Image (spheres, grey):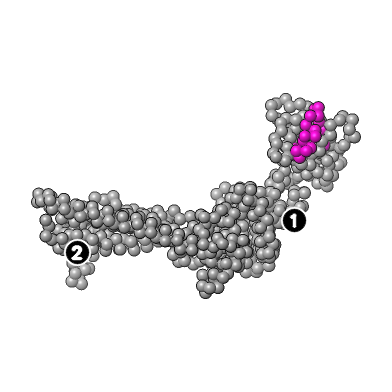
Amino acid sequence: MALEVRFTKQLRSFTLAPDFSCDAEPLAVLGPSGAGKSMTLRCIAGLERPDEGSIRLNGKTLFDSKAGINVPARQRGVGLLFQNYALFPHLTVIENVAFGAQHMPRGEREARARKQIADVHLEGLEHRLPRELSGGEQQRAALARALAIEPQALLLDEPLSALDTYLRSKIEQQLITTLGQFRKPALYVTHNIEEAYRISAKLVVLAKGKVVANGVRDEVFRDPPNLEVALLTGLKNFSRAHPANAGSIEALDWKCVLHSASTRQGNAAYVGIRAHHIGFAFEKSERSATNRFPCWLVRVSETPFHATLYLHLHEPPQIEGHYHLQAEVTKEQWSGFRNQPQPWFAILPPEALLVLSE
Amino acid sequence: MAADLSPIWLSIETSITATVITFALGTALAVWRANKHGAGPALLDGIFLLPLVLPPTVVGFILLLIFGRNGPLGRLLLHFGASVVFSWPATVIAAAVVSFPLMYLSVRASLEQVDANLLQAARTLGATEWRVFRHVALPLAWPGILAGTILAFARALGEFGATLMLAGSIPGKTETIPIAIYFAVEANEMRQAIFWSAIDIAISLAMIICMYYWTQLQGSAQMRVRRG
Protein backbone atom coordinates (compact mmCIF):
# COMPACT_ATOMS: atom_id res chain seq x y z
CA MET A 1 0.00 0.00 0.00
CA ALA A 2 1.55 3.27 -1.03
CA LEU A 3 0.90 6.77 -2.20
CA GLU A 4 3.37 7.92 -4.83
CA VAL A 5 3.50 11.60 -5.60
CA ARG A 6 5.64 13.06 -8.34
CA PHE A 7 4.41 16.08 -10.24
CA THR A 8 5.06 19.70 -11.11
CA LYS A 9 2.71 22.64 -11.00
CA GLN A 10 3.59 26.22 -11.82
CA LEU A 11 2.49 28.53 -9.03
CA ARG A 12 2.72 32.30 -9.00
CA SER A 13 6.19 32.65 -7.49
CA PHE A 14 7.71 29.16 -7.81
CA THR A 15 7.23 25.73 -9.31
CA LEU A 16 5.74 23.16 -7.00
CA ALA A 17 7.55 19.88 -7.59
CA PRO A 18 6.89 17.36 -4.81
CA ASP A 19 8.49 13.97 -5.24
CA PHE A 20 7.98 11.45 -2.44
CA SER A 21 6.07 8.37 -1.49
CA CYS A 22 4.24 7.29 1.62
CA ASP A 23 3.42 3.74 2.68
CA ALA A 24 0.95 2.47 5.24
CA GLU A 25 2.07 4.76 8.05
CA PRO A 26 1.83 8.50 8.62
CA LEU A 27 4.34 10.77 6.92
CA ALA A 28 4.91 14.29 8.21
CA VAL A 29 5.32 17.01 5.59
CA LEU A 30 7.15 19.91 7.18
CA GLY A 31 7.66 23.29 5.56
CA PRO A 32 7.27 27.01 6.15
CA SER A 33 4.08 28.82 5.15
CA GLY A 34 3.88 29.21 1.41
CA ALA A 35 6.08 26.20 0.67
CA GLY A 36 3.29 24.55 -1.33
CA LYS A 37 2.21 22.04 1.32
CA SER A 38 -1.53 22.68 1.06
CA MET A 39 -1.40 22.83 -2.72
CA THR A 40 0.32 19.43 -2.74
CA LEU A 41 -2.54 17.95 -0.72
CA ARG A 42 -5.15 19.62 -2.95
CA CYS A 43 -3.49 18.10 -6.02
CA ILE A 44 -3.51 14.63 -4.43
CA ALA A 45 -7.17 15.02 -3.45
CA GLY A 46 -8.02 16.07 -7.01
CA LEU A 47 -9.10 19.62 -6.20
CA GLU A 48 -6.28 21.11 -8.27
CA ARG A 49 -4.69 19.81 -11.42
CA PRO A 50 -0.90 19.44 -11.64
CA ASP A 51 0.79 20.50 -14.88
CA GLU A 52 2.79 17.34 -15.34
CA GLY A 53 3.72 14.12 -13.58
CA SER A 54 1.72 11.45 -11.84
CA ILE A 55 -0.04 10.56 -8.60
CA ARG A 56 -0.63 6.91 -7.77
CA LEU A 57 -2.42 5.31 -4.85
CA ASN A 58 -2.10 1.57 -4.18
CA GLY A 59 -1.13 1.02 -7.80
CA LYS A 60 -4.15 2.92 -9.08
CA THR A 61 -3.36 6.01 -11.15
CA LEU A 62 -5.16 9.09 -9.85
CA PHE A 63 -3.36 11.49 -12.16
CA ASP A 64 -1.01 11.00 -15.09
CA SER A 65 -0.33 13.86 -17.46
CA LYS A 66 1.17 11.62 -20.14
CA ALA A 67 -1.67 9.11 -20.12
CA GLY A 68 -4.21 11.92 -19.82
CA ILE A 69 -5.67 10.52 -16.61
CA ASN A 70 -7.18 12.86 -14.02
CA VAL A 71 -9.62 11.02 -11.75
CA PRO A 72 -12.19 13.49 -10.35
CA ALA A 73 -11.98 14.22 -6.62
CA ARG A 74 -15.23 12.40 -5.88
CA GLN A 75 -13.86 9.12 -7.23
CA ARG A 76 -10.40 9.25 -5.65
CA GLY A 77 -11.28 7.86 -2.24
CA VAL A 78 -8.89 10.31 -0.61
CA GLY A 79 -9.98 11.87 2.69
CA LEU A 80 -8.94 15.48 3.18
CA LEU A 81 -9.09 17.25 6.52
CA PHE A 82 -9.16 20.97 5.75
CA GLN A 83 -7.20 23.46 7.80
CA ASN A 84 -10.41 25.29 8.80
CA TYR A 85 -12.29 21.92 8.86
CA ALA A 86 -14.83 23.04 6.20
CA LEU A 87 -17.76 21.47 8.07
CA PHE A 88 -21.09 22.17 6.35
CA PRO A 89 -22.54 24.90 8.58
CA HIS A 90 -26.17 24.06 7.72
CA LEU A 91 -25.86 20.37 8.60
CA THR A 92 -25.63 18.71 12.02
CA VAL A 93 -22.63 16.67 13.09
CA ILE A 94 -24.28 13.40 12.09
CA GLU A 95 -25.44 14.84 8.76
CA ASN A 96 -21.92 16.08 8.11
CA VAL A 97 -20.40 12.70 8.92
CA ALA A 98 -22.99 10.82 6.86
CA PHE A 99 -22.62 13.17 3.87
CA GLY A 100 -20.15 10.89 2.11
CA ALA A 101 -22.31 7.77 2.44
CA GLN A 102 -25.25 8.84 0.29
CA HIS A 103 -25.26 5.60 -1.69
CA MET A 104 -26.06 3.52 1.41
CA PRO A 105 -29.49 2.65 2.76
CA ARG A 106 -30.62 5.12 5.40
CA GLY A 107 -30.33 2.84 8.42
CA GLU A 108 -26.86 1.61 7.60
CA ARG A 109 -25.70 5.12 6.81
CA GLU A 110 -26.82 6.39 10.18
CA ALA A 111 -25.35 3.43 12.07
CA ARG A 112 -22.01 3.99 10.39
CA ALA A 113 -22.03 7.70 11.08
CA ARG A 114 -22.80 7.00 14.74
CA LYS A 115 -19.87 4.62 14.94
CA GLN A 116 -17.53 7.19 13.38
CA ILE A 117 -18.78 9.81 15.83
CA ALA A 118 -18.17 7.43 18.73
CA ASP A 119 -14.66 6.70 17.44
CA VAL A 120 -13.73 10.35 17.81
CA HIS A 121 -15.55 10.64 21.15
CA LEU A 122 -18.31 13.00 20.04
CA GLU A 123 -21.26 10.93 21.34
CA GLY A 124 -24.14 13.11 22.41
CA LEU A 125 -23.25 15.91 20.01
CA GLU A 126 -24.78 14.23 16.92
CA HIS A 127 -27.50 16.83 16.50
CA ARG A 128 -25.44 19.94 17.10
CA LEU A 129 -24.58 22.35 14.32
CA PRO A 130 -20.88 22.99 13.72
CA ARG A 131 -21.13 26.51 15.16
CA GLU A 132 -22.35 24.99 18.43
CA LEU A 133 -19.13 22.97 18.80
CA SER A 134 -15.78 23.98 20.27
CA GLY A 135 -12.69 24.11 18.05
CA GLY A 136 -11.50 20.70 19.16
CA GLU A 137 -14.94 19.14 18.62
CA GLN A 138 -15.15 20.66 15.15
CA GLN A 139 -11.77 19.20 14.32
CA ARG A 140 -12.85 15.74 15.45
CA ALA A 141 -16.15 16.00 13.58
CA ALA A 142 -14.23 16.87 10.42
CA LEU A 143 -11.91 13.93 11.02
CA ALA A 144 -14.87 11.58 11.49
CA ARG A 145 -16.39 12.90 8.26
CA ALA A 146 -13.16 12.32 6.32
CA LEU A 147 -12.79 8.79 7.76
CA ALA A 148 -16.44 7.91 7.14
CA ILE A 149 -15.84 7.46 3.42
CA GLU A 150 -13.29 4.76 4.31
CA PRO A 151 -10.59 6.56 2.36
CA GLN A 152 -7.61 4.78 0.85
CA ALA A 153 -5.43 7.69 1.98
CA LEU A 154 -5.87 10.46 4.52
CA LEU A 155 -4.51 13.99 4.06
CA LEU A 156 -4.38 16.34 7.04
CA ASP A 157 -3.74 20.01 6.37
CA GLU A 158 -2.36 21.66 9.54
CA PRO A 159 -5.07 19.96 11.60
CA LEU A 160 -4.06 21.60 14.87
CA SER A 161 -3.22 25.11 13.71
CA ALA A 162 -6.70 26.50 14.40
CA LEU A 163 -6.69 25.27 18.01
CA ASP A 164 -5.38 27.11 21.03
CA THR A 165 -2.30 25.65 22.71
CA TYR A 166 -4.33 24.55 25.71
CA LEU A 167 -6.30 22.02 23.62
CA ARG A 168 -3.62 21.22 21.16
CA SER A 169 -1.57 18.56 22.93
CA LYS A 170 -4.67 16.58 23.95
CA ILE A 171 -6.13 16.65 20.43
CA GLU A 172 -2.71 15.82 19.05
CA GLN A 173 -2.52 12.65 21.16
CA GLN A 174 -5.97 11.55 19.94
CA LEU A 175 -4.89 12.28 16.38
CA ILE A 176 -1.73 10.17 16.79
CA THR A 177 -3.90 7.30 18.07
CA THR A 178 -6.33 7.64 15.15
CA LEU A 179 -3.49 7.80 12.64
CA GLY A 180 -1.90 4.75 14.23
CA GLN A 181 -5.11 2.77 13.66
CA PHE A 182 -5.54 3.97 10.08
CA ARG A 183 -2.86 1.70 8.58
CA LYS A 184 -3.04 3.32 5.15
CA PRO A 185 -1.03 6.16 3.64
CA ALA A 186 -1.52 9.37 5.61
CA LEU A 187 0.11 12.74 5.04
CA TYR A 188 0.32 15.18 7.92
CA VAL A 189 1.17 18.70 6.81
CA THR A 190 2.49 21.17 9.37
CA HIS A 191 4.86 24.08 9.79
CA ASN A 192 5.46 23.15 13.42
CA ILE A 193 8.76 21.33 13.83
CA GLU A 194 7.94 19.65 17.12
CA GLU A 195 4.51 18.57 15.92
CA ALA A 196 6.04 17.01 12.81
CA TYR A 197 8.55 15.18 15.00
CA ARG A 198 5.90 13.78 17.34
CA ILE A 199 3.45 12.73 14.64
CA SER A 200 5.62 10.54 12.53
CA ALA A 201 8.90 8.67 12.38
CA LYS A 202 9.37 9.75 8.78
CA LEU A 203 9.63 13.22 7.46
CA VAL A 204 9.54 15.11 4.19
CA VAL A 205 10.77 18.71 4.28
CA LEU A 206 9.33 20.98 1.62
CA ALA A 207 10.76 24.41 0.77
CA LYS A 208 9.70 26.61 -2.14
CA GLY A 209 7.83 23.66 -3.65
CA LYS A 210 10.71 21.21 -3.59
CA VAL A 211 11.57 18.28 -1.35
CA VAL A 212 14.78 19.34 0.40
CA ALA A 213 14.94 16.44 2.85
CA ASN A 214 13.24 13.09 2.95
CA GLY A 215 13.88 10.28 5.37
CA VAL A 216 13.84 9.02 8.92
CA ARG A 217 13.06 12.03 11.09
CA ASP A 218 15.88 11.46 13.61
CA GLU A 219 18.47 11.48 10.87
CA VAL A 220 17.00 14.58 9.28
CA PHE A 221 17.08 16.36 12.62
CA ARG A 222 20.49 15.05 13.73
CA ASP A 223 22.35 15.53 10.49
CA PRO A 224 20.59 17.95 8.14
CA PRO A 225 22.40 18.01 4.77
CA ASN A 226 22.32 21.77 4.19
CA LEU A 227 21.51 25.07 5.81
CA GLU A 228 17.96 25.23 4.43
CA VAL A 229 16.95 21.93 6.05
CA ALA A 230 18.81 22.83 9.24
CA LEU A 231 16.85 26.09 9.53
CA LEU A 232 13.57 24.33 8.75
CA THR A 233 14.27 21.84 11.51
CA GLY A 234 14.73 24.70 13.98
CA LEU A 235 18.45 25.56 13.87
CA LYS A 236 18.97 28.95 15.55
CA ASN A 237 22.78 29.40 15.36
CA PHE A 238 24.83 29.26 12.18
CA SER A 239 27.92 30.90 10.77
CA ARG A 240 29.52 31.01 7.34
CA ALA A 241 32.46 28.63 7.39
CA HIS A 242 35.17 26.98 5.39
CA PRO A 243 37.37 23.96 6.02
CA ALA A 244 40.53 24.62 8.04
CA ASN A 245 43.17 22.08 9.17
CA ALA A 246 42.25 18.43 9.45
CA GLY A 247 39.38 17.99 11.90
CA SER A 248 38.55 21.67 12.18
CA ILE A 249 36.44 24.35 10.55
CA GLU A 250 36.88 28.10 10.53
CA ALA A 251 33.65 29.84 11.52
CA LEU A 252 33.81 33.22 9.78
CA ASP A 253 30.91 34.98 11.51
CA TRP A 254 31.85 33.63 14.91
CA LYS A 255 35.55 34.51 14.33
CA CYS A 256 36.90 31.22 15.65
CA VAL A 257 38.20 27.81 14.63
CA LEU A 258 36.08 24.88 15.74
CA HIS A 259 37.00 21.25 16.16
CA SER A 260 34.44 19.05 14.52
CA ALA A 261 33.60 15.37 14.61
CA SER A 262 31.83 15.51 11.27
CA THR A 263 33.07 13.69 8.18
CA ARG A 264 31.72 16.41 5.93
CA GLN A 265 34.21 19.17 6.77
CA GLY A 266 35.64 19.05 3.26
CA ASN A 267 32.62 20.86 1.77
CA ALA A 268 31.59 22.89 4.78
CA ALA A 269 29.87 26.14 3.76
CA TYR A 270 28.18 26.74 7.10
CA VAL A 271 28.55 25.49 10.60
CA GLY A 272 25.72 25.49 13.10
CA ILE A 273 24.75 24.40 16.59
CA ARG A 274 21.30 23.94 18.10
CA ALA A 275 20.50 26.34 20.93
CA HIS A 276 20.13 23.64 23.60
CA HIS A 277 23.46 21.99 22.71
CA ILE A 278 25.57 24.91 23.91
CA GLY A 279 27.25 24.22 27.27
CA PHE A 280 28.70 26.60 29.85
CA ALA A 281 31.79 26.86 32.07
CA PHE A 282 32.61 29.68 34.49
CA GLU A 283 36.20 29.46 35.69
CA LYS A 284 39.20 30.26 33.53
CA SER A 285 40.92 27.38 35.27
CA GLU A 286 38.07 24.98 34.65
CA ARG A 287 39.22 21.85 32.88
CA SER A 288 39.74 23.01 29.35
CA ALA A 289 37.12 21.70 26.99
CA THR A 290 37.41 21.82 23.20
CA ASN A 291 35.60 24.65 21.45
CA ARG A 292 35.46 26.75 24.60
CA PHE A 293 35.14 30.51 24.08
CA PRO A 294 34.68 33.48 26.41
CA CYS A 295 31.26 35.10 26.02
CA TRP A 296 29.20 38.00 27.37
CA LEU A 297 25.46 38.02 27.94
CA VAL A 298 23.68 40.50 25.64
CA ARG A 299 20.15 39.87 26.81
CA VAL A 300 17.92 37.10 28.08
CA SER A 301 14.40 36.05 27.16
CA GLU A 302 12.48 33.89 29.61
CA THR A 303 9.54 31.53 29.21
CA PRO A 304 7.98 29.70 32.18
CA PHE A 305 10.42 26.80 32.04
CA HIS A 306 13.26 27.91 29.80
CA ALA A 307 15.59 30.86 29.27
CA THR A 308 17.11 31.89 25.96
CA LEU A 309 20.50 33.58 26.40
CA TYR A 310 21.84 35.83 23.65
CA LEU A 311 25.64 35.75 23.73
CA HIS A 312 28.49 37.76 22.24
CA LEU A 313 31.76 35.82 21.76
CA HIS A 314 35.35 36.87 22.52
CA GLU A 315 34.67 40.40 23.77
CA PRO A 316 31.85 42.48 25.31
CA PRO A 317 29.37 43.62 22.62
CA GLN A 318 30.44 46.86 20.93
CA ILE A 319 27.18 47.38 19.08
CA GLU A 320 23.99 47.52 21.14
CA GLY A 321 22.12 44.22 20.88
CA HIS A 322 24.59 42.44 18.62
CA TYR A 323 25.03 38.74 19.43
CA HIS A 324 26.62 35.59 17.97
CA LEU A 325 24.79 32.74 19.62
CA GLN A 326 21.53 31.98 21.32
CA ALA A 327 21.63 29.26 23.93
CA GLU A 328 18.64 27.60 25.51
CA VAL A 329 18.87 26.44 29.12
CA THR A 330 16.33 25.34 31.72
CA LYS A 331 15.18 27.77 34.39
CA GLU A 332 17.05 25.71 37.02
CA GLN A 333 20.32 26.00 35.12
CA TRP A 334 19.70 29.70 34.54
CA SER A 335 19.10 30.50 38.18
CA GLY A 336 22.19 28.42 39.02
CA PHE A 337 24.60 30.60 37.06
CA ARG A 338 22.91 33.93 36.38
CA ASN A 339 24.98 35.69 39.07
CA GLN A 340 28.35 34.32 37.94
CA PRO A 341 30.80 37.06 36.96
CA GLN A 342 31.30 37.51 33.22
CA PRO A 343 32.85 36.50 30.91
CA TRP A 344 31.35 33.05 30.92
CA PHE A 345 32.65 30.33 28.68
CA ALA A 346 30.44 28.87 25.94
CA ILE A 347 31.24 25.31 24.98
CA LEU A 348 30.30 24.13 21.48
CA PRO A 349 30.81 20.33 21.69
CA PRO A 350 32.37 18.94 18.48
CA GLU A 351 29.78 16.14 18.21
CA ALA A 352 26.93 18.70 18.39
CA LEU A 353 28.20 20.86 15.52
CA LEU A 354 26.22 20.66 12.30
CA VAL A 355 28.48 20.92 9.28
CA LEU A 356 26.35 22.11 6.40
CA SER A 357 26.94 22.25 2.67
CA GLU A 358 25.69 25.04 0.39
CA MET B 1 -64.68 54.33 -4.92
CA ALA B 2 -63.35 52.14 -7.65
CA ALA B 3 -65.92 49.69 -8.82
CA ASP B 4 -63.46 47.79 -10.93
CA LEU B 5 -60.80 46.03 -8.83
CA SER B 6 -59.25 44.24 -11.80
CA PRO B 7 -55.90 46.16 -11.58
CA ILE B 8 -55.23 44.46 -8.23
CA TRP B 9 -55.63 40.94 -9.58
CA LEU B 10 -53.84 41.85 -12.77
CA SER B 11 -50.89 43.29 -10.86
CA ILE B 12 -50.62 40.28 -8.54
CA GLU B 13 -50.99 37.72 -11.33
CA THR B 14 -48.48 39.57 -13.47
CA SER B 15 -45.92 39.95 -10.68
CA ILE B 16 -46.18 36.35 -9.52
CA THR B 17 -45.90 34.98 -13.05
CA ALA B 18 -42.98 37.29 -13.83
CA THR B 19 -41.23 36.35 -10.56
CA VAL B 20 -41.60 32.62 -11.26
CA ILE B 21 -40.00 33.19 -14.68
CA THR B 22 -37.15 35.36 -13.39
CA PHE B 23 -36.54 32.97 -10.49
CA ALA B 24 -36.06 30.00 -12.81
CA LEU B 25 -34.17 31.92 -15.48
CA GLY B 26 -32.12 34.09 -13.11
CA THR B 27 -31.07 31.14 -10.91
CA ALA B 28 -30.23 28.92 -13.88
CA LEU B 29 -28.16 31.59 -15.61
CA ALA B 30 -26.40 32.63 -12.38
CA VAL B 31 -25.45 29.01 -11.66
CA TRP B 32 -24.24 28.58 -15.23
CA ARG B 33 -22.29 31.81 -15.02
CA ALA B 34 -20.70 30.86 -11.67
CA ASN B 35 -18.71 28.14 -13.45
CA LYS B 36 -17.79 30.15 -16.54
CA HIS B 37 -14.96 32.58 -17.00
CA GLY B 38 -13.79 34.65 -19.92
CA ALA B 39 -14.81 37.48 -22.19
CA GLY B 40 -17.94 35.87 -23.65
CA PRO B 41 -19.75 35.33 -20.35
CA ALA B 42 -18.61 38.75 -19.15
CA LEU B 43 -20.21 40.36 -22.21
CA LEU B 44 -23.39 38.38 -21.54
CA ASP B 45 -23.35 39.83 -18.02
CA GLY B 46 -23.58 43.27 -19.58
CA ILE B 47 -26.62 42.28 -21.59
CA PHE B 48 -28.25 40.60 -18.56
CA LEU B 49 -27.84 43.76 -16.49
CA LEU B 50 -28.90 46.21 -19.19
CA PRO B 51 -32.59 46.34 -18.12
CA LEU B 52 -31.40 47.59 -14.71
CA VAL B 53 -29.67 50.67 -16.08
CA LEU B 54 -31.77 51.51 -19.15
CA PRO B 55 -34.80 53.76 -18.77
CA PRO B 56 -37.89 51.48 -18.70
CA THR B 57 -39.23 53.31 -21.76
CA VAL B 58 -36.16 52.24 -23.71
CA VAL B 59 -36.60 48.64 -22.53
CA GLY B 60 -40.27 48.87 -23.55
CA PHE B 61 -39.38 50.29 -26.91
CA ILE B 62 -36.83 47.54 -27.59
CA LEU B 63 -39.38 44.91 -26.56
CA LEU B 64 -41.87 46.56 -28.89
CA LEU B 65 -39.34 46.29 -31.73
CA ILE B 66 -38.77 42.61 -30.94
CA PHE B 67 -42.38 41.58 -30.34
CA GLY B 68 -44.03 44.06 -32.71
CA ARG B 69 -45.71 43.17 -35.99
CA ASN B 70 -42.40 43.56 -37.88
CA GLY B 71 -40.09 42.33 -35.11
CA PRO B 72 -38.39 38.92 -35.33
CA LEU B 73 -40.37 37.29 -32.52
CA GLY B 74 -43.53 39.20 -33.39
CA ARG B 75 -43.53 37.80 -36.89
CA LEU B 76 -42.86 34.31 -35.66
CA LEU B 77 -45.78 34.52 -33.23
CA LEU B 78 -48.01 35.98 -35.91
CA HIS B 79 -47.18 32.92 -37.96
CA PHE B 80 -48.94 30.88 -35.28
CA GLY B 81 -51.76 33.37 -35.16
CA ALA B 82 -50.72 34.94 -31.88
CA SER B 83 -49.87 38.51 -31.00
CA VAL B 84 -48.23 39.56 -27.75
CA VAL B 85 -48.33 43.34 -27.97
CA PHE B 86 -51.20 44.93 -25.97
CA SER B 87 -52.12 41.62 -24.30
CA TRP B 88 -51.71 40.25 -20.77
CA PRO B 89 -48.55 38.23 -21.65
CA ALA B 90 -46.97 41.57 -22.62
CA THR B 91 -47.32 42.82 -19.03
CA VAL B 92 -45.62 39.63 -17.83
CA ILE B 93 -42.80 39.94 -20.38
CA ALA B 94 -42.17 43.58 -19.47
CA ALA B 95 -42.19 42.87 -15.72
CA ALA B 96 -39.96 39.80 -16.11
CA VAL B 97 -37.37 41.55 -18.27
CA VAL B 98 -37.15 44.53 -15.96
CA SER B 99 -36.93 42.46 -12.72
CA PHE B 100 -34.56 39.84 -14.13
CA PRO B 101 -31.27 41.67 -13.35
CA LEU B 102 -32.14 41.92 -9.63
CA MET B 103 -32.76 38.18 -9.41
CA TYR B 104 -29.67 37.33 -11.43
CA LEU B 105 -27.40 39.63 -9.42
CA SER B 106 -28.66 38.40 -6.05
CA VAL B 107 -28.25 34.73 -6.90
CA ARG B 108 -24.80 35.27 -8.33
CA ALA B 109 -23.64 37.28 -5.34
CA SER B 110 -24.97 34.76 -2.83
CA LEU B 111 -23.47 31.79 -4.71
CA GLU B 112 -20.11 33.53 -4.84
CA GLN B 113 -20.25 34.06 -1.10
CA VAL B 114 -20.43 30.34 -0.38
CA ASP B 115 -17.01 29.21 0.91
CA ALA B 116 -15.31 27.35 -1.96
CA ASN B 117 -13.71 25.03 0.61
CA LEU B 118 -17.15 23.64 1.47
CA LEU B 119 -17.86 22.75 -2.14
CA GLN B 120 -14.47 21.10 -2.42
CA ALA B 121 -14.95 19.23 0.84
CA ALA B 122 -18.19 17.85 -0.60
CA ARG B 123 -16.33 16.72 -3.73
CA THR B 124 -13.70 14.85 -1.70
CA LEU B 125 -16.60 13.12 0.08
CA GLY B 126 -17.72 11.66 -3.22
CA ALA B 127 -20.53 14.08 -4.09
CA THR B 128 -21.49 14.64 -7.72
CA GLU B 129 -21.63 18.21 -8.99
CA TRP B 130 -25.43 18.14 -8.78
CA ARG B 131 -25.30 17.00 -5.15
CA VAL B 132 -22.69 19.65 -4.34
CA PHE B 133 -25.07 22.25 -5.74
CA ARG B 134 -28.30 20.87 -4.32
CA HIS B 135 -27.09 20.03 -0.81
CA VAL B 136 -24.29 22.53 -0.16
CA ALA B 137 -24.28 25.57 -2.46
CA LEU B 138 -28.05 26.06 -2.71
CA PRO B 139 -28.94 25.80 1.00
CA LEU B 140 -26.09 28.14 1.93
CA ALA B 141 -26.99 30.67 -0.76
CA TRP B 142 -30.71 30.39 -0.03
CA PRO B 143 -31.15 33.54 2.11
CA GLY B 144 -29.60 35.63 -0.67
CA ILE B 145 -31.70 33.96 -3.33
CA LEU B 146 -34.82 34.63 -1.28
CA ALA B 147 -33.86 38.28 -0.89
CA GLY B 148 -33.38 38.46 -4.65
CA THR B 149 -36.84 36.97 -5.17
CA ILE B 150 -38.43 39.63 -2.96
CA LEU B 151 -36.58 42.39 -4.81
CA ALA B 152 -37.59 40.96 -8.18
CA PHE B 153 -41.24 40.67 -7.09
CA ALA B 154 -41.26 44.24 -5.81
CA ARG B 155 -39.73 45.49 -9.03
CA ALA B 156 -42.24 43.52 -11.11
CA LEU B 157 -45.11 44.91 -9.03
CA GLY B 158 -43.94 48.47 -9.61
CA GLU B 159 -43.21 48.10 -13.31
CA PHE B 160 -44.70 50.95 -15.33
CA GLY B 161 -42.69 52.31 -18.28
CA ALA B 162 -41.93 49.15 -20.24
CA THR B 163 -45.41 47.80 -19.51
CA LEU B 164 -47.08 50.90 -20.88
CA MET B 165 -44.96 50.73 -24.04
CA LEU B 166 -45.49 47.05 -24.72
CA ALA B 167 -48.90 46.32 -23.19
CA GLY B 168 -50.64 49.66 -23.16
CA SER B 169 -53.45 50.38 -20.76
CA ILE B 170 -56.44 48.19 -21.47
CA PRO B 171 -58.71 48.00 -18.41
CA GLY B 172 -59.20 44.41 -17.25
CA LYS B 173 -56.50 43.19 -19.59
CA THR B 174 -53.24 45.09 -19.19
CA GLU B 175 -54.06 47.89 -16.77
CA THR B 176 -51.95 47.09 -13.70
CA ILE B 177 -51.97 49.21 -10.54
CA PRO B 178 -49.09 51.55 -11.49
CA ILE B 179 -50.75 52.26 -14.84
CA ALA B 180 -54.13 52.77 -13.19
CA ILE B 181 -52.48 55.31 -10.83
CA TYR B 182 -50.92 57.18 -13.73
CA PHE B 183 -54.16 57.52 -15.64
CA ALA B 184 -56.11 58.37 -12.50
CA VAL B 185 -53.75 61.26 -11.82
CA GLU B 186 -53.88 62.36 -15.43
CA ALA B 187 -57.67 62.40 -15.26
CA ASN B 188 -57.37 64.33 -12.00
CA GLU B 189 -59.15 61.55 -10.03
CA MET B 190 -57.00 62.00 -6.95
CA ARG B 191 -59.05 59.76 -4.63
CA GLN B 192 -58.72 56.95 -7.15
CA ALA B 193 -54.94 57.48 -7.33
CA ILE B 194 -54.63 57.48 -3.55
CA PHE B 195 -56.71 54.28 -3.34
CA TRP B 196 -54.52 52.41 -5.82
CA SER B 197 -51.34 53.71 -4.19
CA ALA B 198 -52.51 52.50 -0.78
CA ILE B 199 -53.30 49.07 -2.23
CA ASP B 200 -49.85 48.94 -3.81
CA ILE B 201 -48.14 49.82 -0.52
CA ALA B 202 -50.23 47.23 1.34
CA ILE B 203 -49.35 44.44 -1.09
CA SER B 204 -45.64 45.26 -0.96
CA LEU B 205 -45.58 45.43 2.84
CA ALA B 206 -47.54 42.20 3.22
CA MET B 207 -45.19 40.48 0.83
CA ILE B 208 -42.08 41.59 2.72
CA ILE B 209 -43.55 40.69 6.12
CA CYS B 210 -44.62 37.23 4.90
CA MET B 211 -41.17 36.53 3.51
CA TYR B 212 -39.51 37.77 6.67
CA TYR B 213 -41.60 35.58 8.96
CA TRP B 214 -41.30 32.63 6.67
CA THR B 215 -37.49 32.70 6.81
CA GLN B 216 -37.57 33.22 10.58
CA LEU B 217 -39.99 30.35 10.99
CA GLN B 218 -37.95 28.08 8.77
CA GLY B 219 -34.76 28.93 10.65
CA SER B 220 -36.20 28.19 14.08
CA ALA B 221 -37.97 25.05 12.87
CA GLN B 222 -34.64 23.73 11.70
CA MET B 223 -33.08 24.49 15.04
CA ARG B 224 -35.90 22.72 16.90
CA VAL B 225 -35.60 19.60 14.78
CA ARG B 226 -31.86 19.53 15.24
CA ARG B 227 -31.90 19.96 18.96
CA GLY B 228 -34.15 16.89 19.00
In the image, residue A288 sits, relative to residue B23, either above or below, namely: above
Residue corresponding to mark 1: A216
Q: Is residue B179 above or below residue A252?
A: below
Report helix, strand or loop for mark 2.
helix
Question: Can the viewer see residue A152?
Answer: yes
Q: Observer-nearest residue: A147 or A358?
A: A147
Q: Chain of mark 1?
A: A
In the displayed structure image, the side of residue A24 where residue A150 appears, left or right: left
Residue positioned 20% across, 71% down in the render: B79
Magenta stretch: give its range: A327-347
Residue B36 in view here: no
Residue at disc 1, secondary structure: strand
Q: Is residue B136 left or right of residue B58?
A: right
Task: From the viewer's perspective, tell me whether residue A226 is left or right of residue A103.
Answer: right
Choose top left, top right, bottom left or bottom right for residue B196: bottom left
Residue A65 located left or right of residue A301: left
Q: Where's residue A323, x and y in %?
A: 72, 32
Q: Residue at x 56, y 53 (%)?
A: A134
Query: Which residue shows up at 22% across the image and 68% down it?
Result: B76
Mark 1: give few (<14), some (14-19) or many (20+) Cα within 10 Å.
some
Between the residue at mark 2 and the residue at mark 1, the CA separation in whole angstroms equals: 78 Å
Q: Quadrant of residue A122?
A: bottom right
Picture residue at 20% right of the left edge, 72% below the top: B80
**What residue sits right under mark 2 in the picture?**
B88
Quarter of the view holding residue A43: bottom right
Kindly report which numbered mark, 2 or 1, lies closer to the viewer in this rendering: 2
Q: Toward the viewer: B187 or A335?
A: A335
Residue A272 position in % (x across, y down): 76, 41
Parent chain of label 2: B
